[in-house]
Image: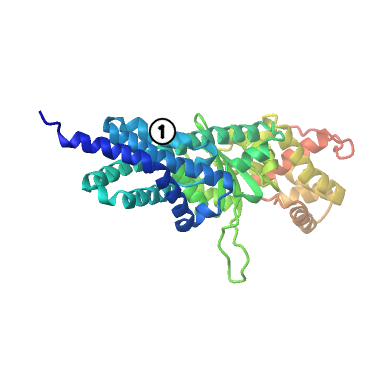
Amino acid sequence: MTTPAAPLDKAETLAWLRRISGDIATVTTKRLEDALPWYAEMPPARRSSVGLVAQAGITSFIQWYDDPTSTPWIAADIFAAAPRELLRSISLQQTLQLIRVTVEVTEERVADRGAQLREAILLYSREVAFTAADVYARAAEARGLWDARLEALVVDSILSGESDEELPSRIAALGWHGHGEVAVLVGTTPPQFDIDHLRRTARKLGVDVLVGVQGSRLVLVIGRTETGGKGADETLVELPFPDIATRLEPRFGAGYLVLGPTVPALVDASQSARAALAGFAVARAWRHAPRPVEADDLLPERALAGDALAKLTLVERIFRPLQAHSPDLVATLWSYLDNGRSLEATARELFVHPNTVRYRLKRVSEVIGWDATGPREALILQTALILGAAGSDVGRRKPTTLRRR
């Protein structure tokens, strides 16, 4: 009985492929240097690693040609020859270019061995390409999970104020593009939170964000990037942080949205975060609080809730500047607020003309930036006076006789 020709031909082909595999690897390496500029520019160690991958591909093809059922593990084994740092240094596109060059060289060497072998090469190269895509997809997924955990760790460190020497390196590892001023925005997490949509919106506004989802609370650390548009004078157009918060507001869930004060750099973000969290905790105490609201606009509520930072801010930004500027301004403001913001009653108590009261109130506004004639700002100013007087013998008012009703 005659032995079938096909198995004999396959055995001869396998033996021939094993004999020329070294030559194919050598030619492939030379072709990579000539055809791929990125390969030629690589350090010698990495070029050697890429060469190992190409050689592993040729060897694995021979094994697969001997047993096609081994496709899954043989194809995956090609990339086991590459060190992990190589997978991080070349892209998926470059990997596919590597596969193409290797397949082209192999096809050229086996061109005279028949269509069946060329078809096998094409089939195997397809399997390798899909395996390469799977390898990079898994790496990207792992990188995404790692980035998410690292980002959550960074945001937690900022919120707690427990930053250490590793914080800058962690921020750099996240690819933070922010520079200069930073502010923290605190709100509620929407039922269907799309973090990618949020990041796209932030990029359009010329800012970068660190995102922290803590149950029902959503925290953004916002920093400016260098990709903002330029105006007619070629200067960088930068939106104020309150405007940025307003543009990001639709990405939050229902409820209060509090913006912390602006700080000079990301390493100082814990100061903004502390104020924003304190404001978020008491925002419900302001019946008509806007959305978003700045944490400094909630200073009275924060101070009443025991926030030491709010108390210090009120004293340092309102009471002490007024006291240092003129005792008459402090006395006039006290009297004006005690008398229900009545110019005439204040003038009678101070024995001055109402126009003098108007002038002094205007000076108060110029010195500290708050207008005592508005109901909300009057509350802020009165809280500051109470806190300042309670902690200062110099600024404490003389006791007055309580009015009988």
Give the residue displayed 67% in from the left and 37% down from the top: 167
**Secondary structure category for the residue under label 1:** helix
Q: Quadrant of the N terminus?
A: top left
Residue closer to the observer: 144 or 238 = 144
395 relative position to 180: left or right: right
Residue closer to the observer: 88 or 256 = 88
Give the residue displayed 61% in from the left and 54% down from the top: 240
What is the three-letter code of the residue carrying label 1?
A: Asp
Give the residue displayed 62% in from the left and 71% down from the top: 233
Q: Position of residue 321 (x, y in %)?
A: 82, 48
Q: Residue furthest bottom?
A: 232
Residue closer to the observer: 88 or 217 = 88
Please say whether residue 310 is visible from this viewpoint. Answer: yes
Q: Residue furthest right?
A: 394
Q: Position of residue 125 (x, y in %)?
A: 32, 44
Badge 1 density bin: few <14, some 14–19, many ≥20, Cα 10 Å: some
**Pointer 1 residue:** 77
Q: Residue furthest left?
A: 1
Q: Position of residue 166 (x, y in %)?
A: 68, 35
Q: Position of residue 397 (x, y in %)?
A: 85, 38
Please say whether residue 127 is visible from this viewpoint. Answer: no
Instruction: Decide: is 227 above or below 405.
Output: below
Q: Quadrant of the C terminus?
A: top right
289 relative position to 328: left or right: left
